[in-house]
Amino acid sequence: MTIIDTNRIIVALDYPDQASAVQMARQLDPALCRVKVGKELFTRCGPSVVEALHALGFDVFLDLKFHDIPNTTARAVRAAAEMGVWMVNVHASGGRRMMEAAREQLEQVADNRTLLIAVTVLTSMERSDLAEIGLDIDPLEQVVRLARLTQSAGLDGVVCSAQEVAAIRAAIEQPFALVTPGIRPADAEQGDQRRIMTPSQAIHTGSDYLVIGRPITQASTPADVAACIQNDVAAALNARQA
Ligand SMILES: O=C(O)c1cc(=O)[nH]c(=O)n1[C@@H]1O[C@H](COP(=O)(O)O)[C@@H](O)[C@H]1O
C-alpha cells in the first residue's frame, strides 16, 4: 500500500457505551482523523457501534488484536472485513501460519479493502515485562523480528511504538504501514504506556498513523486538543515531505 493521505490520526474510542463513543466522534472531523473501536466498546456494543461510526463518515480501525489458532483468527478477520472496517489487527506472536491464514481469508472477501496489520510488542511493555514472559530480548529487537515476519506473511503493516519506526524502516522493504500508539503530547500523562513519543516526533521519525486515546478523549476540551495535535501532525508531515 502507498500512503498518500494526510489523515494520520486514529482516535481510540475507549468507552463503555455507544452513546459516549458517538458523542466523542461527533466532536471530531472524519476528514482529519479516523477512529478506533477496541475491546471494551466492541464487547459491549458489537457491530452496531461500527455501523454508527460509518454513518458519521469515519473510517474505523477495529482493534480486537486477534490471537488464536489460524482457522479461528482467519474467520474473525474475515468477519471484520465483511463489516467494512478500514483496518483490523492480529497479534504477530500468533505466528506465520496464523497471519497467512488471515490474509488468505481476506483475499476471498469480494472487493476487500480492509487493511490487515499485526501488533508486535505492546507499547505498554518494556524489557522487564518481556523477560517475565521468557523473552530475554530488547523490545526493539523483538519488534523488528516480528515486523519482518509480518511482512513476509503478506500483511499490510504493524503496530509498534514510534521508538521502533526508524529501525523497522531500515530493516524491511516498503511499502509497509507503521501504526504507532503510545503517543503522548509533551504535557500529557504517560499512564500505562511505556514506549512513548510526541505526535510531531512520531511523524518526523516516519510513523504513518498515530493512535491517540486518553490525551484527546479525557481532555476537558477534546475537540481543541484534537485540532492542536492535527496542526502539529500537518506541520511535521510538511517538514517530512519538504
Ligand atoms: O493495537 C493498538 O491499537 C495498541 C497496541 C499497542 O501496542 N498499544 C496500544 O496502546 N494500543 C491501543 O492504542 C490505544 C492507546 O490509547 P491511549 O494510551 O489512551 O492513547 C489503546 O486503545 C490501546 O488499546
Image (cartoon, helix red, strand yellow):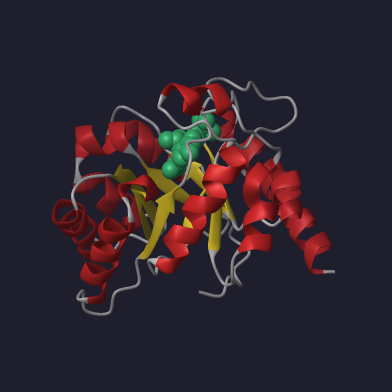
Where residue 134 appears, as percent x and y from the top left, is 42, 28
Q: In this rendering, does residue 160 appear at all?
A: no
Give the farthest residue toward the bottom. 111
Question: Quarter of the image holding residue 152?
Answer: bottom left
Q: Residue 220, relative to residue 78: is it above or below?
A: above
Where residue 232 appears, as percent x and y from the top left, is 75, 47
Where residue 101 appears, as percent x and y from the top left, is 23, 64
Residue 75 as seen in the image, left or right of residue 12: left
Q: Residue at x 56, y 75 (%)?
A: 2
- In front of the other: 198 or 97: 97
- In front of the other: 165 or 69: 69
Q: Residue at x 56, y 51 (%)?
A: 144
Q: Residue 119, relative to residue 40: is it above or below?
A: below
Q: Residue at x 70, y 33 (%)?
A: 185
- In front of the other: 167 or 211: 167
Where residue 149 appears, as percent x and y from the top left, is 44, 59
The quarter of the rendered structure image containing the C terminus is bottom right
Q: In this rendering, does residue 115 appear at all?
A: yes
Total number of numbered discs in the rendering: 0
